[in-house]
Image (spheres, rainbow, N blue to C red):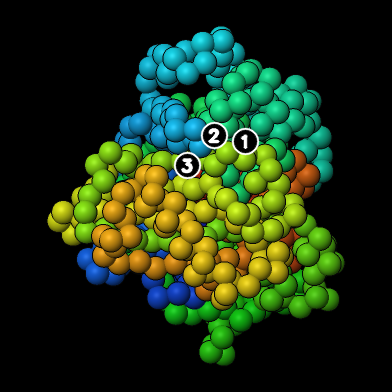
Amino acid sequence: MSARKIIVIGSGFGGLGAAVRLQSRGYQVELVEARDMLGGRAYVYEQDGFKFDAGPTVITAPFMIDELFEGAGRRTADYVRIVPVDPFYRIEFHDGRSFEYGGDEAETERKVAAFSPDDVEGYRAMIRATKDIFAKGFLELSDRPFLKFSDMLKVAPDLIRLQSYKTVYSFVSGYIKDDLLRRVFSFHPLLVGGNPFQTTSIYALIHHLEREWGVHYAMGGTGAVVQGLGRLFAELGGKVRLNSPVKRILTSGGAANGVELEGGEQIQSHAVVSNADIANTYRLMLPPEERKRNSNRHLESMRYSMSLFVIYFGTKKQYPDLRHHTIILCERYKELLHEIFNTKVLSPDSSLYLHRPSATDPSMAPPGNDCFYVLIPVPNQQSGIDWRKQSGPFRDRVMKLLDEHYMPGLLDNLATERCFSPLDFETTLRSYAGAAFSFEPIFRQSAWFRPHNESEDIRQLYFVGAGTHPGAGVPGVLSSAKIVEKLICERLPN
């Protein structure tokens, strides 16, 4: 081969990011995707004139997308248009009150003062503290691989100084007194699969990430970013195979050297990058005798994120008072999260994330219509909940809540609808235990303790995506692609 060949399994943002980066560096990259289009979790459903982003909807670090295009000598604007969203979020509380914030820091302070006058100084101190966490946790550590325990020891003093042993909720509570404002500034771990009462306070950096670069949206939906990256990859000479699920990773002498597709075809390579679910990559694509570190027993003993129940729907009427991003929090906060993450029972109430992309981009719905999805955190498949029986009643309960309290006339104005349950995460997306964000982002599953970007068991096998370092979310998985690019360029220079 004139250039070293790399196979990338899966085309989520992590896989696409790695494929574009490596192709830009002169490697011969072949991207194999099990589904019928690129995107992984960032899949797109189109029906009845509506367009639904299946996965990520919040872009908080657009410069990381810019890096992919700039590394290939291109401009993002020539492929996709990314625009700011303001306000960032509107949070609705059970008592009828609400709180929203955006990019204007002075305006956010005024809203904090109006909501809870005693918390203004605490809020300012919290923002200063998140800046320090952001500088260490994101700017310095997010694109650094943690392959040896000594890598962890080097940063341990800083992690202790930043009180990363605390949870996000505990961190926020040290500055904010009002119970509802504590919820406003601690819900962010849920966006990456974590329980605010269990997730390491390093994830408080998300709040500063928003402050630093804002919250953005890609016109045409997040799928437009996927399409742009796919077009760029093709222009660079990359090869894509759709409808090509991988049966196993081929190895020789303890090193990955290709993949075998479910149809029986084998593709040889110098290295393999997996953007597939990490637990299932090891459990289903590699034999047990080749996995001393990542045994089935070890993987099954880890803690996995919650799952999600998602309802995609379009309406024949518009709801102009609804923001682009709305968080609806029920009265119970800590108790509900405990039931979702720990006891794994289906609660009688729910907190919701309501996404209305047509607030920013009318093209997502037919004229005069509105486009939505409502996302509800629920226990993963380790709960034993039978979603074949529960999906209908659960859907009805959620839509009734929206109809009665937030979207009057919803049930009479539905134009189209589809649901996606934890069972679909387990089957369609091949996610272990139906976890929506792979491993739960607790301290003992972060950095060196998280599955490594370079396999400890199989040489020339690398990982990108939510399950490896630094973790879930678009900035996290794009950072993992940057890490793998560095590792492959060091290990297998072209």
Q: Quadrant of residue 234?
A: bottom left
* Residue 463 in view, yes or no: no
Residue projecting furthest to the left: 367
Residue 354 in the figure: left or right of residue 475: left
| Pointer 1 residue | 203
Residue at point 52%, 27% (across, down): 208
The percent coordinates of residue 158 (x first, y second) are 74, 25
Q: Position of residue 375 (x, y in %)?
A: 48, 54
The C terminus lies in which quarter of the figure? Answer: bottom right
Looking at the image, do the residues carrying marks 1 and 3 touch, with CB atoms under 8 Å apart? Answer: no
Amino acid bearing label 2: Ile
Q: Mark 3 — residue?
A: 328
Residue found 32% across the figure and 35% down from its top: 84
Secondary structure of the residue carrying numbered label 3:
strand
- Return the disc, 2 or 3, that comes first in the chain's sequence: 2
Q: Type of residue at label 3?
A: Ile
Mark 2 or mark 3: which is in front?
3
Neighbor class of circle 3 (other Cα within 10 Å; few <14, some 14-19, many 20+) is: many
Q: Is the C-beta separation of discs 2 and 1 under 8 Å?
A: yes
Q: Which quarter of the figure has residue 437? A: bottom right
- Rounded to the nearest whole Å, what is the CA distance between mark 2 and mark 3? 19 Å
Q: How many marks?
A: 3
In the image, is 164 to the left or to the right of 211?
A: right
Q: Position of residue 319 (x, y in %)?
A: 26, 46
* Mark identifier at residue 342: none
Residue under numbered circle 2:
206
Q: Earlier in the sequence, mark 1 or mark 3?
A: 1
CA gap between label 1 and label 3 equals 21 Å
Give the vertical position of 229 relative to 74 (above or below).
below
Helix, strand or loop status at disc 1: helix
Q: Please report the residue visible at 40 percent of the width from the left and 75 percent of the height from the top.
A: 36
At label 1, which amino acid type do we have?
A: Tyr
